[in-house]
């Protein structure tokens, strides 16, 4: 495990040469700031709401890598005073699907900070998020000696076809995608890294009904008190050192955890899937996006009689999808 971590850190330092700073405002980062790291490509339509959401939660500074966008993403990001942006035209696949770039920014700028690492369609929900800023959570985690915080990714979707309601730039995507699957999840334990491996939900049910083991992983560890010796290994599914993956309780009881509401299943997915299939830069030759592209032409409806309409974090706790544990 130490050797694997060392290799990850060496990779990210080498990959720094692929990053060109467009606006580096990292000197304004204060010692106690909460940070967010994100790799994007052609996501300008999502970014106004994404930034507003995380600013309201209490994120102080954003670190973005723009991977050769053509829709004005980089220009929009460089206009934001609390955002530092780097650009790259290098291969997303050869950077371990962006993780090498993220690991470098985390190593360089996030040492000693609580930091969220998320995609632009992921929205962090934690216990009491409707009344307490994220700093209340990180202060409590710090006081209890916890270094990493786990979540499950929940695929959100509309009641009708995703093509029926166009998404507008800056719009809250959950005005459209209000529903989710509360069950049909499979959970195993990864023996190598010790993290849980969760699959299921709406994408598994619709896109991978015949091959459920190929469905996307839903386990994420997005919030970490970072140290320059840490490294993500596979997206934000697992980290090294191995102990950071212990975000669940093995001896009974419940450990505090949250969710990431996933806003992928909106009308922008069709064009995104075709673009990523053509690029071939995602995992397994963009096989996940190929599954989307193959079936979206049939205009599937994700909603069914067992779908739940999202209300708040307390509903998710009642359903057993997150827990406040002993944080009161």
Image: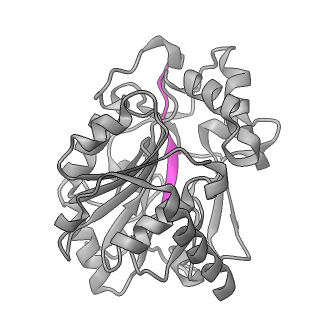
Residue 295 in which image quadrant: top right
Please name the residue shown 55% across and 83% down the image.
Answer: 243
Q: Quadrant of the N terminus?
A: bottom right
Q: Position of residue 257 (x, y in %)?
A: 42, 66
Describe residue 161's horizontal placement relative to residue 127 as left or right: right
**Is residue 209 in the magenta section?**
no
**295 or 71, which is in the foreground?**
71
What colouring method underlies this structural image? one colour
Confirm whether residue 256 shows in the render: no
Front one among 125 and 236: 236
- Which residue lies at the image location 72% right of the left edge and 77% below the top edge? 192
Residue 145 percent location from the top left of the image: 36, 87
Residue 201 is situated, as x and y percent measured from the top left of the image, at 61, 42
Q: Image height check: is 45 above or below 165?
A: below
Q: Please provide the residue range marked out in magenta.
A: 151-159
- Examine the rendered structure and indicate whether residue 210 appears above or below residue 199: above
Q: Position of residue 318 (x, y in %)?
A: 42, 54
């Amino acid at each position: 495990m130490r050797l694997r971590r060392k290799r990850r850190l060496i990779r990210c330092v080498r990959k720094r040469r692929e990053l060109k700073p467009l606006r580096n405002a990292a000197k304004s980062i204060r010692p106690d700031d909460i940070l967010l790291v994100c790799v994007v490509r052609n996501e300008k339509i999502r970014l106004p709401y994404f930034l507003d959401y995380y600013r309201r939660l209490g994120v102080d500074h954003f670190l973005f890598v723009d991977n050769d966008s053509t829709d004005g993403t980089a220009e929009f990001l460089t206009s934001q005073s609390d955002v530092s942006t780097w650009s790259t035209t290098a291969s997303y696949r050869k950077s371990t699907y962006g993780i090498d770039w993220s690991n470098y920014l985390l190593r360089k700028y996030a040492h000693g900070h609580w930091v969220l690492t998320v995609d632009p369609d992921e929205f962090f929900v934690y216990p009491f998020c409707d009344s307490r800023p994220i700093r209340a959570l990180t202060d409590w985690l710090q006081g209890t000696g916890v270094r990493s915080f786990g979540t499950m990714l929940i695929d959100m979707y509309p009641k009708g076809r995703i093509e029926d309601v166009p998404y507008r730039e800056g719009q809250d995507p959950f005005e459209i995608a209000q529903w989710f699957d509360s069950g049909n999840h499979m959970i195993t334990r990864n023996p190598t890294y010790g993290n849980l491996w969760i699959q299921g939900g709406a994408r598994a049910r619709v896109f991978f009904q015949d091959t459920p083991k190929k469905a996307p992983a839903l386990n994420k560890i997005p919030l970490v008190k970072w140290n320059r010796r840490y490294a993500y290994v596979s997206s934000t599914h697992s980290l090294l050192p191995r102990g950071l993956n212990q975000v669940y309780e093995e001896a009974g009881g419940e450990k505090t955890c949250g969710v990431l509401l996933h806003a992928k299943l909106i009308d922008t997915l069709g064009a995104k899937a075709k673009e990523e299939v053509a690029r071939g830069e995602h995992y397994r030759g963009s096989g996940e996006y190929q599954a989307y592209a193959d079936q979206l032409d049939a205009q599937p409806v994700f909603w069914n009689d067992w779908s739940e309409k999202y209300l708040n974090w307390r509903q998710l706790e009642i359903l057993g999808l997150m827990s406040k544990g002993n944080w009161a």
